[in-house]
Image: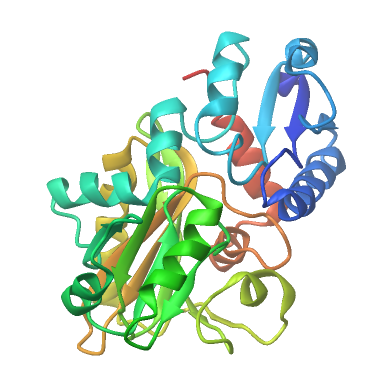
Amino acid sequence: MRKFGKVAVLLGGHSDEREISLKSGAAVLAALQAQGIDAHGFDPRDKPLHDLEVFDRVFISLHGRFGEDGCIQGALELLHIPYTGSGVMASAIGMDKWRTKLLWHEMGVVTPDFALVTARSDFAAIEQQLGLPLFVKPANEGSSIGITKVKDAGGLKAAYEIAAAADPLVIAEKFVGGGEYTVGIIGDAMQGLEALPIICIIPKNEFYDYEAKYLRNDTEYLCPSGLSAEKEKIIKQEALIAFSAIGCKGWGRVDFLMDEEGNHYFLEINTSPGMTDHSLVPMAAKAAGISFEQLVVRILELADVG
């Protein structure tokens, strides 16, 4: 483990996902230290970034703005410090749900129908275009922050205002109601990308919101997912395409939905997934025979600059 040198685990940060990041970072830090790695927690909210110059590499456990949107990645490149996960461009695009969808659409990756919403939008026309129910989301937030499920006609405007309070870029998205799933991915172009076993998510809430993700203990996670072996193989292959289309590497997660007819739609990408006791990538890795400790070391091995 000496090859890693002195490792900083970035956690906390400035975003609305700070509390989840603190939990993720603490889990990663403990796993690295348990394996004899000289790892140290580093909260960029409390310390200047130039203090990172004494570290040999960085494990990014930040979520949300300034952590997975390309900002910290750019700073680390300027410092010439290898870091985990995707680079500046892929992180920035992956954080932006609207631009991810635009890119996927051009690449032939199927995603639910969507519309950009502004204060001047014809809300009734968008409701008619996408149908009800529909989801309204801030384009640059994670952990389901600012998301509303609009079920009644005339509800889009209020949902837009909630989302716009979190981010000025807001999208409305067609409802797809056949189930929520995710695919964890690890690797890079040199070592090859690997799709982990698919997880089916069954929330007891209306949808897989912040509470269902982090606070409730009754959310069900099925792995095996219940999909046929053939369907799972197809979706994994397409998830790798969706991941690579954004330019992602190292590790991440691609979420998708199923409709009632068994068609799948890729939803969004996460370039710095959670690593808490409720998190999905560690669950999928465990199903693949990879322990949490092995997972964090493998991710750290893939750290580079840019």
Q: Quadrant of residue 60?
A: top right
Give left or right: position of 41 versus 11: right
What scheme was used to colour the molecule?
A: rainbow
**Residue drawn 49% across the image and 60% down it:** 163
Could you tell me residue 42's position as x and y percent?
81, 30
159, 115: nearer the viewer: 159
Give left or right: position of 131 versus 306: left
**Residue drawn 37% across the image and 29% down it:** 190
Residue furthest front in the image:
120
Could you tell me residue 147's position as x and y percent?
50, 67
Please say whether residue 18 is visible from this viewpoint.
yes
> Count of labels shown?
0
199, 100: nearer the viewer: 100
Could you tell me residue 35's position as x and y percent?
82, 40
Q: Quadrant of residue 137?
A: bottom left
**Residue drawn 58% across the image and 64% down it:** 280
Q: Is residue 166 above or below residue 190?
A: below
85, 259: nearer the viewer: 259
Q: Is residue 140 above or below residue 225?
A: above
Could you tell me residue 119's position as x and y percent?
35, 56
Q: Quadrant of the N terminus?
A: top right
Please say whether residue 198 is visible from this viewpoint.
no
Give left or right: position of 43 versus 231: right
Q: Is residue 97 above or below residue 49?
A: below
